[in-house]
Image (spheres, grey):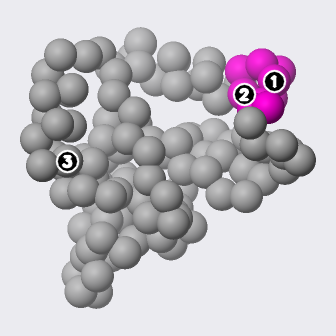
Amino acid sequence: AADTCLAMAEASSDAVIVESNSDVVAPTPLSSYPSLAIMVAPGEAYLVEGTRLSRALEAIAMSGRPWAAKAMEALELTGHLGRVDLPLLEDPDEGYPPDVISPLVEAVKGRLRKG
């Protein structure tokens, strides 16, 4: 059901964001084929090329646990296009100010423009 909704969203949108929790990289089969990914760990975020991430997830799947792939495990296999430090927030509801996330946003925009 989740992949059906994801496919419908992809068909009608220029960009779709899939969020996962528990440090799982791809929560559904379709989400394991992104064009671009942002992997977030405590204190940092990484921009990862989608094809490299898909290949890393395929390699991890060979270990017999495809949907348990953890972010840092996949990142070790993919490398990253960019990295942003994220200060730990005392109140997560306040979010990050533009000066913290704008380098990541600009990197994503640049990659999306390249296609």
Inspect the image, locate mark 3, and give the three-letter code of the amino acid beneath it: Ala
Tell me, for residue 97, which label it has, or none: 1
Circle 3 or circle 2, nearest the eye: 3
Q: Are marks 3 and 2 in contact (CB under 8 Å)?
A: no
Find residue 84 and report its image quarter: top right
User: Marks 1 and 2, Cα distance to the nearest angstrom?
Assistant: 7 Å
Tell me, for residue 101, which label it has, or none: 2
Viewer-closest of 1 and 47: 1
Q: Could you say where residue 32 lies in the image, as x and y percent from the top left?
A: 27, 53
Q: Could you say where residue 43 lies in the image, as x and y percent from the top left?
A: 78, 53
Mark 3: secondary structure: helix
Q: Residue at x 31, y 65 (%)?
A: 57
Find residue 55 and report its image quarter: bottom left
Q: Could you say where residue 112 lies in the image, as x and y percent from the top left?
A: 41, 19
Residue 77 seen = no
In the image as oriented, which residue stretches furthest toward the bottom?
63
Q: Are marks 1 and 2 in contact (CB under 8 Å)?
A: yes
In this rendering, is residue 78 above or below 4? below
Q: Could you say where residue 69 lies in the image, as x and y percent from the top left?
A: 40, 71
In this rendering, is residue 21 above or below 111? below
Left or right of 74? Residue 14 is: left
Inspect the image, locate mark 1, and give the three-letter code of the amino acid beneath it: Pro
Q: Residue at x 81, y 24 (%)?
A: 97
Mark 3 lies on residue? 2
